[in-house]
Image (spheres, rainbow, N blue to C red):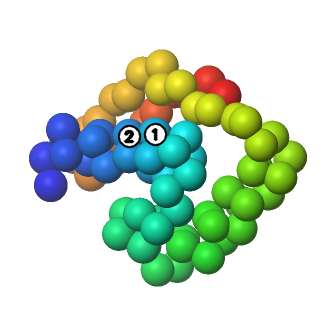
Amino acid sequence: MSTAENKALVRQYFEVFHNQRQLDIGERILGSELLTPTLGMAAMMRTAFPDYQIVIDDQLAEADKVATVWTA
């Protein structure tokens, strides 16, 4: 994947998985070892903060790594 594709994938995690609550994309964008704990964490976030939203402030990418600065 290109750095642009990697950044888009991470953006989907925040904007679609979290903000739009479309948890089914987790199966596509998360590794199998991360899926269950991430779904659990997302459930806890929705319980504690039912209307939370994440805003991506900045993203940097190099090779296969993406760093995201966000505000919730």
At x 68%, y 57%, the residue is: 42
Q: Which part of the image, by quadrant, shows the C terminus? A: top right
Residue occupying the far right of the picture: 48
Instruction: Tell me the tag on residue 51.
Output: none
Residue 33: x percent and y percent? Answer: 52, 79
Would you say the residues marked 1 and 2 are in contact, meaning their CB atoms lie under 8 Å apart? Answer: yes
Q: Can residue 33 be spotted in the picture?
A: yes
The percent position of residue 13, horizontal first and vertical second, equals: 45, 49
Instruction: Give coordinates of residue 20: x percent, y percent.
Output: 51, 45
Picture quadrant of residue 37: bottom right
Judge left or right: residue 45 versus residue 7.
right
| The disc label shown at residue 15, or none | 1
| Residue with the most extreme top position | 57
Q: Amino acid at mark 1?
A: Glu
Q: Is residue 25 above or below residue 52?
A: below
Up the image or down, 64 lies above or below 11; here it is below
Numbered disc in front, either 1 or 2: 1
Residue 10 appears anywhere in the view: no
- Who's the residue at 26% across and 47% down the image? 6
Tell me the residue that label 2 is attached to: 11
